[in-house]
Structures are given as structure tokens and as C-alpha cells.
Image (cartoon, rainbow, N blue to C red):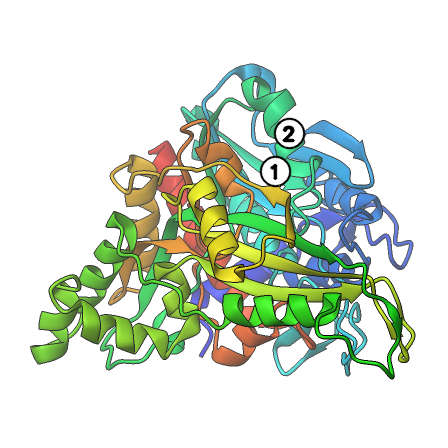
Amino acid sequence: MKTIFFYILLAYSSCLFSQNMQNNGAEGELLSIESVLQDYIQIPSVSGNEKQAGEFLKLVCQNNDLHITDLGSEDGNYNFSASLFPLSSGKPNIIFINHIDVVPESLDQDEKPYSGRIENETIYGRGAIDNKGAAMMQLYGILLLANDQNFESSPYNVTFLAVSCEETQCSGGAAYVKENFTETLNPAVVFGEGPSELTSLMEGDFEHPVFGISVVHKRVLWLNLEIKSKTNGHGSITPANYANKQLIKALDRLVGKKQKAIYNETNTKFLKDIGELHKGGKKMVLKHPKLFKPIVTAQLRKHPELFSLFSNTITLTNIYTDSDAVNKLSSVAGAQLDCRLLPETDEQEFLALIRKLLKDDSIKIEVIKSQPRNAPSSPETVFFKNLSLAIHEKYPESTTLDMMMPNVNDLGIFRLDNIPAYGTMPIFCDYEEVRCVHGKNEHLHLESLYNGAEVYYSFLKKMIE
């Protein structure tokens, strides 16, 4: 059953102005939140090609009287801020960051990837969740505050910050904005993408909903491995050793090795907090994870998505050679690894471990991309506490937990400057919704758009009171 707020917000959002670029609609056309999202999804914006979708989104913000500042105007670096007050006001800024870009459509996509189709109260298409749907929750939460007469006395500015190339973590987008406009934006806190409600994705008997708020994430270390061999020639004669064979044997030693479970302050606290929600023996074990480390680790290994919070991961994502002929030995063989490091991991020590596991000094290791360490944001700030209260008000029996995320997003860029940064998507996502992100038939239940917007609006009201 939809909440009363769903219908109130639907009626309100029908009075918001935007321009339907896809259908060349006139400025001032009335669109609801899902209609804006539908039009937004229908503009393809794969990383590096964000400008058209960004211009559409900027017009939506302009036509709703937000103050626009351009922060980059080209594909791959199309960014803008839309604020309640001009940035020149100098108010400390509550920033909601979101990214315009999406990943390319799947090869096995059985639905038009940019359809924006709405069926059975569900919207489909690339970005429905990541990150266009999440952006709509942020934007409409801000617009609800803009309709509140009390906002003029706010001690904070509130800014919707749309950026490019988050999916590829390029030098444009958030990195460019932080490098060139941090003083202009004057961020007091940054909110961005993060976990949704957790219990639908976890084992255990949970009596009430649990929402995660990320305070830190793992960092990227992308590697290219390559071996060159003088052995080449016809494939009918098999030499004792050759490039492909050497590489495959080394990769088997590397990826076949179980990664060590590492219990740090953030992931240990997460287990203890989860333990508080259980009873009996399970509560005892989770409340003392280091004491029962063998038991806890064995259970975590059964769930890679959870074990990734307790380990550095090595994923083999690509293998290549210098030849596509079936009957010719390649003289060059290579592979690419997507490694994700826990915040405290020393990069050089990890690279030494890679070298040790490969057991082949002829394999060259090249760092394609790496990121510096970033410390967790404190869950003791007024921003974290008020967001937790807003989630609890929307979902009265819920609990919020601070946690680490295994994936990388733009929040880490701000944490490097000790700017508090938190990630969440304060909605329920079922397993199919989570599974389809970056996959085929990405979709989101429409009610989630309104629920998320309500949480953000409630949070912002607390911040201006």
C-alpha cells in the first residue's frame, strides 16, 4: 500500500516544471518525478557521453528555480551544481552528489536499454537505479525543501551536484570538481550512492529493517600482467614452455589462492552491530567476531558479497594475446586484474604478495590505476545522526548501521580532504533490483522514488531547524 505521502508528493511533483528534450516538449511542461526519470533514462549517457543528458537534467533544475553553476561543459567532464542559494552566499553546503553516466548496455539485454518503460509500478532502463533513479530521489527531496517557507532561514546551502564519468573514475567528473571548485562549493558534508536496506540481501532472522550508511569504501588497484616469450611458431609443435602456458599457470596460482580475512575497526563494528539484532548463540558469535574468527570467517566465505568487506580481492577480468590465429603460438600474453583493497592495506605490500603468488619473475606487472587510502567518516556527526533519524521516521522500526562498501564511488574523493561523506539509498530493494544493476533490465519500483525523496526531505528539515 502506498503511503499518503506518495500521493501528496505525486500531486506536488505534477506541478514541477521541466523540459522534455526527448519529445521536444515546450519549456514548462508538467512532469511527475517518474516522468522526469523516464525522460532522463531515455537519453543514453554512457561514460564519456554525458552532455546531452546533463543538459536535460540542468534544465529541470533551472526550471525549478535552483541556482546553477557550470563546473565543466564537455563530454567526459560535464558537471554542474544546482543550489537552494547562490554559491556566492558562502553558506556551508550540504551536497548531494550523483553521476550522469551509466555503464554500456549488456550484450544479453532483452529489453531496450534506454526505454524508460513503466509497467506494474516499475520503471525500466539503464540508470533506473544507478544513478539516475537515485538522483531523482535527491533532487525531489531538495525541491520539497525549496517549497518549504522555512528554508530561507537555513544556515546551510543545499546543492544537487551532477557529475560525469563516475563509472570509469576518470580525471573529469568529481575529481575535476574537487580539484577546481572545492572552495566555491564550500562542502560541509557530501551524500552519495550507497547501500539500500540490507536484510533482504543477508541471511538471518531479522525482525526489523536494517539500513546501511557507508562511511568508507575499498579502493581500486587495477593491474596489467604481461609476459613476452621468444618461443613462437606453428601451434602443431608444442614447446616445453610458451607465453600462454606460463601466464595461465601463474594466474592459476594467483586466483586459486584464498584471500586472508582481515578484521578492521569498520567491518568488525558492522558484525557487532548486526549481532545486536540477533539472539542466542548467533548474537554471541557476532558480538565477538575475533574470538570466534574461524567460525565467522567460514560463514563469510560462503557469501562473496559479504566476504569482500573483510578481504582484499583479486578478480581476473581480461586475458589477451598478440595473435588471433588458432594455429600460431603467441609471443605475448597478458591479463588484467581488478583488485579492491581495504582502506588500511599498503599498496606496495599487496603488489609484493601478487608477485610472490605468481612465482614467475618474467611476468611484468603494471599499475593501470590506483587510489590513495581514505579514512572513514565519523558516524558521530550531526549529518549522520539526522540522516539516521530521518530513515527511522520513515521506517519506524528500522535500525541504521555505519559500514564499508566494497565498490568505489565519488565519495572517497571528498574523504581524502577530511570532508564528511556518507553513502546510502534509503529504500527497500529486492534481490532482483540489486542483481540487475549494471546488468540487463535494470529497474526500480516507483514507490521507492517517493520514499527516498521523503527521507532526504525529512533529513534536510532537521538540518534547517
* Numbered circle sitting on residue 349: none
Give me the C-alpha separation between circle 1 and circle 2.
Answer: 10 Å
The residue to which callout 2 is attached is 177
Give the residue displayed 73% in from the left and 46% down from the top.
Answer: 57
Camera-side residue of 410 and 171: 171
Q: Quarter of the image containing the C terminus?
A: top left
Q: SS for tag 2?
A: helix
Is 120 situated above or below 16? below
**What kind of residue is marked 1?**
Leu
| Picture coordinates of residue 47, whole percent (x, y) | 76, 51
**Residue 84, quarter of the rendered image:** top right
* Mark 1–mark 2 CB contact (< 8 Å): yes
What label does residue 161 carry, if any? 1
Identified at 59% across, 53% down, the residue is 361
Please give left or right for residue 162 compared with residue 189 in the image.
right
Q: Position of residue 398 (x, y in %)?
A: 27, 65
Pointer 2: residues within 10 angstroms few (<14), some, or many (20+)?
many
Q: Residue at x 76, y 37 (%)?
A: 78
Q: Amino acid at mark 2?
A: Val
Q: Which residue occupies the foreground of this view, 261 or 145? A: 261
As drawn, 135 above or below 382: below
- Circle 1 crowding by C-alpha within 10 Å: few under 14, some 14–19, many from 20: many
Left or right? Give the position of 166 relative to 299.
right
Q: Residue at x 22, y 66 (%)?
A: 274
Which quadrant of the figure has residue 332? bottom right
